[in-house]
Image (tube, rainbow, N blue to C red):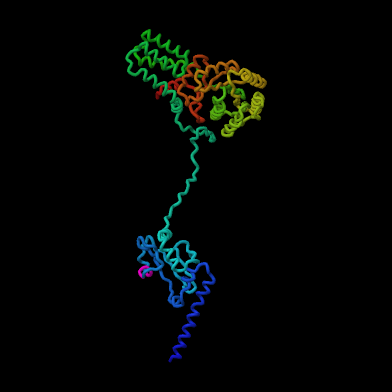
């Protein structure tokens, strides 16, 4: 019996030594991580009982550090007890014998890196990072991407878009565009007069003086204002104006009469080509006026050619070429610095050979007080006369309404140098002092061919005195 006991004891000792060999081998293979070799290499008895279990992260009590052990209620918590919105992370334990445990993170389907720490170390990390794990397994919020609207923008209302032929105006009829363009001048002029006559029961000297001041503020000019006030004062003295309302009506008639004599539309000769020479100082809008005028002539059924005679300003040729491309109009041009008279001569000769109806020639902006620049205009006229002794058939002076009384000085110099035959008054929409047209009319009596009341291609309007006065007084 004792013999059998010692045999069994001896076999048990050998078994214990054999069981100790894997632990020693594990320690030799990974000497730097003793904790992993001690925990990840359990005994064969544990390996035999190992089976995949679902483990819920352990949440330690408040104030206590997390521990590597867990109670049975945490080790075998049913999966159904987890919240349906925030499922508990499951740790799937593989073979305990080889330590190849895998953790299902519930994310991208790939096993987490468990090369360090073993089962209990992984369980400990899971407990201490419960918030991170919960956030990782929380269902992600799906955001619907908003597809950008790739439809092309509507550019039909662009101020100077003239790419489409015969594009209808978006600002309404003729009078609507006129009134819109003169809104700033009308606001300053008509409202000032309205306040002046408001509450007046009789015409007296003070009323006439205040009326004179209001006209001067509107840039009507000293000479034109004096003429208007003298006329009204004489009529009051003859008892023709009995009350302020009659004076107000008489003022509108006087202003209309002053403009009637300069209302003269542009009429071109039948012989081809008719030549329009456009002149003016820098920045008044000559090139833009040419582009709008060429479009208007096209709509009247005329063929047009442009001459880029402004060879001084760097971008002038390119700007005129853009207008030509938009309106399908040929442009005769040379390099910057070329002789302006030569360019215009070539354009007239080409138009004559091709039977073009109208040639519009641009010129360089020049100050009216520079004699040598003004003399160049005389040269241009002499060169054109070699092809047609009657050319140019129209010398159109472009004036900026915002320059006020300085426009009178410009007109005087250009009339002397180039023999101006008509005026285009631009940028009336950008000033509150559009009364300069009365000063020009009173002093020079030159025909006002066009007025510019906006940036659109249709906003270069033929001048109509009655319509202008109605818009100025904001009347329908």
**Front-most of residues 293 and 112:** 112
At horizontal 52% and vertical 67% (from top left) the residue drawn is 32
**Front-most of residues 74 and 417:** 74
Q: Quadrant of the N terminus?
A: bottom left
Q: Position of residue 120 (x, y in %)?
A: 44, 68
144 relative to 345 in the view: left or right: left
Above or below, comparing residue 237 to residue 65 in the picture: above
Above or below, comparing residue 351 to residue 213 in the picture: below
**Front-most of residues 402 and 396:** 402
Quadrant of the image occupied by residue 247: top left
Q: Position of residue 153 (x, y in %)?
A: 49, 41
Quadrant of the image occupied by residue 368: top right
Q: Does the image show residue 352?
A: no
* Magenta range: 72-76
> In the rendered structure, does residue 75 fall within the stretch colored magenta?
yes
Q: Position of residue 465 (x, y in %)?
A: 46, 20
Q: Quadrant of the C terminus?
A: top left
Q: How many marks?
A: 0
> In the rendered structure, does residue 166 fall within the stretch colored magenta?
no
Q: Does the image show residue 148?
A: yes
Instruction: Kindly give the residue lying farthest to the top in the view shown.
Output: 238
State whether the magenta stretch is mostly helix, strand or loop. Answer: helix
Q: Position of residue 133 (x, y in %)?
A: 42, 61
């Amino acid at each position: 019996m004792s013999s059998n006991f010692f045999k069994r004891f001896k076999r048990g000792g050998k078994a214990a030594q054999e069981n100790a060999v894997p632990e020693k081998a594990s320690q030799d293979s990974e000497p730097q991580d003793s904790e992993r070799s001690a925990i990840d290499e359990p005994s064969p008895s544990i390996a035999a009982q190992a089976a995949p279990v679902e483990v819920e992260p352990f949440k330690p009590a408040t104030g206590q550090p997390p521990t590597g052990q867990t109670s049975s209620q945490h080790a075998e918590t049913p999966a159904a007890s987890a919240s349906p919105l925030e499922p508990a992370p499951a740790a799937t334990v593989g073979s305990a014998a080889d330590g190849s445990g895998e953790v299902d993170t519930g994310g991208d389907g790939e096993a987490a890196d468990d090369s360090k720490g073993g089962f209990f170390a992984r369980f400990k990390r899971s407990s201490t990072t419960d918030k991170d794990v919960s956030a990782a397994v929380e269902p992600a919020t799906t955001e619907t991407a908003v597809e950008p609207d790739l439809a092309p923008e509507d550019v039909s209302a662009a101020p100077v878009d003239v790419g489409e032929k015969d594009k209808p105006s978006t600002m309404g009829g003729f009078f609507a565009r006129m009134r819109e363009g003169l809104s700033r001048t009308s606001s300053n002029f008509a409202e000032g007069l309205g306040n002046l006559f408001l509450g007046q029961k009789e015409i007296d000297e003070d009323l006439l003086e205040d009326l004179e001041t209001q006209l001067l503020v509107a840039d009507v000019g000293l000479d034109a204002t004096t003429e208007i006030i003298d006329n009204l004062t004489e009529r009051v003295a003859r008892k023709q104006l009995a009350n302020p309302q009659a004076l107000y009506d008489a003022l509108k008639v006087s202003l209309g009469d002053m403009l009637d004599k300069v209302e003269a539309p542009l009429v071109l000769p039948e012989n081809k080509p008719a030549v329009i020479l456009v002149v003016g100082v820098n920045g008044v809008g000559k090139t833009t006026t040419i582009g709008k005028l060429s479009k208007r002539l096209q709509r009247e059924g005329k063929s047009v050619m442009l001459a880029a005679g402004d060879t001084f300003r760097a971008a002038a040729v390119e700007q005129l070429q853009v207008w030509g491309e938009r309106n399908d109009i040929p442009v005769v041009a040379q390099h910057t610095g070329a002789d302006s008279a030569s360019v215009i001569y070539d354009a007239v000769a080409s138009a004559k050979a091709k039977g073009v109806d109208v040639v519009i020639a641009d010129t360089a902006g020049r100050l009216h007080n520079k004699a040598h620049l003004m003399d160049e205009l005389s040269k241009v006229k002499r060169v054109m006369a070699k092809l047609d002794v009657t050319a140019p058939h129209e010398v159109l002076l472009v004036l900026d309404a915002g320059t006020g009384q300085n426009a009178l000085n410009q007109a005087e110099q250009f009339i002397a140098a180039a023999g101006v035959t008509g005026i285009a008054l631009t940028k009336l929409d950008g000033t509150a002092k559009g009364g300069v047209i009365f000063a020009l009319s009173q002093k020079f009596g030159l025909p006002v061919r066009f007025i510019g009341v906006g940036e659109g291609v249709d906003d270069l309007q033929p001048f109509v005195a009655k319509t202008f006065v109605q818009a100025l007084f904001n009347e329908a």
